[in-house]
Amino acid sequence: MHAFWPRMRHSSSATAESMKAQRERWEKRLKGLQRFLEEARAYQKSKWAKRPDFRSDVRFEAMLPVLEKRLPLFIHALGVVEIQNALQFVEAHDLEAVLVSGQDVARLTDLIKARDIPVILSTVQELPLRRWEPYDSAMRVPAKLAAAGIPFCIANGSGSSGSSSARNLPYLAAAAVGSGFSPAEALKAITLYPARILGVGDQLGSLEPGKLATLMITDGHPLEITTNVQRAFIAGREIDLASKHTQLYEKYLEKQRRREKRPQ
């Protein structure tokens, strides 16, 4: 279950009138979210009480695992103000949560640690948010979270391009290594730690007896850009690594071979 926190900052070019409109817009969204949670709680109590006038509602049924803490709420909040408000909301409604955020989590490590909320870090290779910040401020965040003892993992961004850029995930972790993050921890941040955060750490994320044997075999360190995946397995079964990329590679490699065989 995902909740996307509204942006609670005015744009730098906003006029007084547009600032008022922006504030009204985000306040309306937050009131709607608050009202929805209250209605879901009321639905939960009504169902528990087995009231004769109770009617099932698929929207609120989907919320029951979240309200009962059987599923976490993945709450997306990027800026400092948004993160603070989102965590206050989570605490007020007594929810299990996972924070999906960017580089500003490094400015709130004490708060996040105190709330014991894991983080999915969605931005590692990104420009600084403020003019005075160092060029690698986003790349330094993993090391800061690790030093603060906050459980987290590294993601390959968010939105529609997330899945298509999954192949770049090892390089995001490697960028953090270049800014003070441990190579061993960087590898765990894209394998074991996300499995734990998603509740499947007993099945995936590491090579241990009893797990699902989902793994890959490479010809070098997985975080190196020159490394190639040789074989891959999902739940113990080898998968075909052929793709349009490998087909084009073989096609033009064969074309080059034929050209070399031609008499000079």
Image (tube, rainbow, N blue to C red):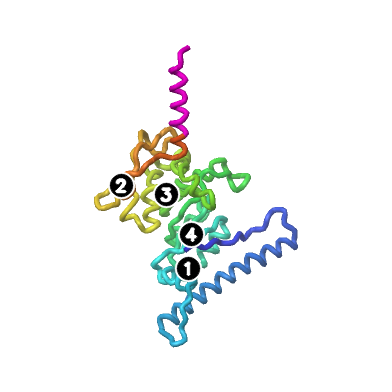
Check residue 111 in the rendering and tell me which mark sits there, or answer none.
Answer: 4
Neighbour class for label 2 at 10 Å: few (<14), some, many (≥20)?
few
Location of residue 228 with respect to 39 vertically, above or below: above
Which residue is tagged 3? Answer: 146
Badges 4 and 3: C-beta atoms under 8 Å apart?
A: no
Q: Is residue 131 left or right of residue 253?
A: right
Note whether residue 105 is visible: yes
- Which numbered disc flags the more N-terminal residue, 4 or 2? 4
Q: Secondary structure at mark 2?
A: strand
Q: CA distance from mark 4 to mark 3?
A: 15 Å
Q: Secondary structure at mark 3?
A: helix
Depth check: give the residue in front, 120 or 158. 158
Neighbour class for label 3 at 10 Å: few (<14), some, many (≥20)?
some
Q: Residue at x 45, y 55 (%)?
A: 119
The mark closer to the camera, 1 or 2, is 2
In the image, residue 11 lies in the stretch drawn in magenta: no
| Residue 148: x %, y % from top left | 43, 52
User: Could you tell me the amino acid type at mark 4?
Assistant: Leu
Which residue is tagged 2? Answer: 237
The part of the chain drawn in magenta is 248-264
